[in-house]
Image: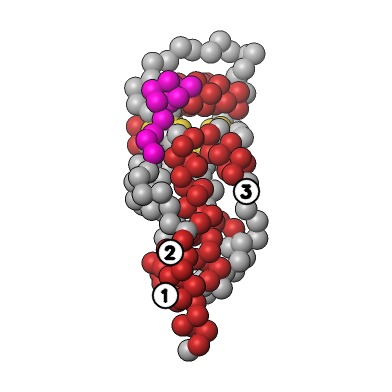
Amino acid sequence: MVASVASVVALVACLSACASPSEPPGGPTTQQIQAAVDERLDRQWEISGLQGEWPRPLVAVQKVQNSGQWNPELGVCLREGGIRDWGYATREGLRMHNAVATPEQQMLMYICFARYPTIDLLSHEQLDYIYDYFVRWLVPCLELHGYRLSDAPSRTQFVARSLVGNGVWNPYHAIARFPSSPEEQSSLLEDCSPTISGVPGWSS
């Protein structure tokens, strides 16, 4: 009971002293979004394996999607081109089930992706805000509940990785011991929320 009371007192102290900024920052500008789309499409063309072999087509972007959300338009575009049983690898692009994707299929994947590109729609300021939440509240909360992190990126690494489209790291990705039961996991998520409100495209 004493340990439990001590944890509660420490948690209350953390909540008082380690609060995140009250007002979340704004999202990226139109220019920043366009730059992220251009960079993402360059990378998609590179991993298609067509660079230097096929001319790169000019494709009008129809919708920019957040990388953390489902992209149904991409699937529809591929199905309309005759590709149904497919997967995707970050370093390989299109992957076919029990087959190697042909150049024509990789080209269709690029065209569809260029129409409906996915990027991380978060500004540098929003990423700083998220990192502050992790450092000031989430990590101490996890540690007070007996969970230790195996590793963690620096602020510079965290922001840089997110800005190039490699996803937003979360302390939950690095806890050395995971909850042993659904009940323990539910309780931990309730006490130590992995996100907070106010950041579209990231907040749960």
Amino acid bearing label 2: Leu
Label 1 sits on residue? 183
Mark 2 and mark 1 in contact? Answer it, CB < 8 Å. no
Q: Nearer the viewer, mark 2 or mark 3?
A: 2
Instruction: Confirm whether the magenta stretch covers residue 32.
Output: yes
Across and down, in percent, residue 55 comes to: 56, 10
Tell me: 150 left or right of 103: right
* Horizontal side of residue 52 vs 73, given as left or right: right
Mark 1: amino acid:
Glu
Above or below 127: residue 31 = above
Magenta-highlighted residues: 25-35
Q: Is residue 151 visible?
A: yes
The dot on residue 33 is: none
Sooner in the amino-acid sequence: mark 2 or mark 1: 2
Disc 3 marks which residue? 153
Location of residue 82 by image quarter: top left
Most foreground residue, 10 or 56:
10
Q: Which residue: 53% across, 60% down? A: 139
Which of the two residues, 91 or 38, is positioned nearer the viewer here? 38
Which residue, given by chain and number where applicable, does mark 2 sit on?
15
Which comes sooner in the sequence, label 3 or label 1?
3
- The answer to whether residue 113 is above or below residue 167 is above
Residue 75 appears in view = no
Labels 2, 1: front one: 2
Structural distance between the alpha carbons of marks 2 and 1: 24 Å
**Of pointers 2 and 3, the one earlier in the residue sequence:** 2
Question: x%, y% of residue 65?
Answer: 38, 33
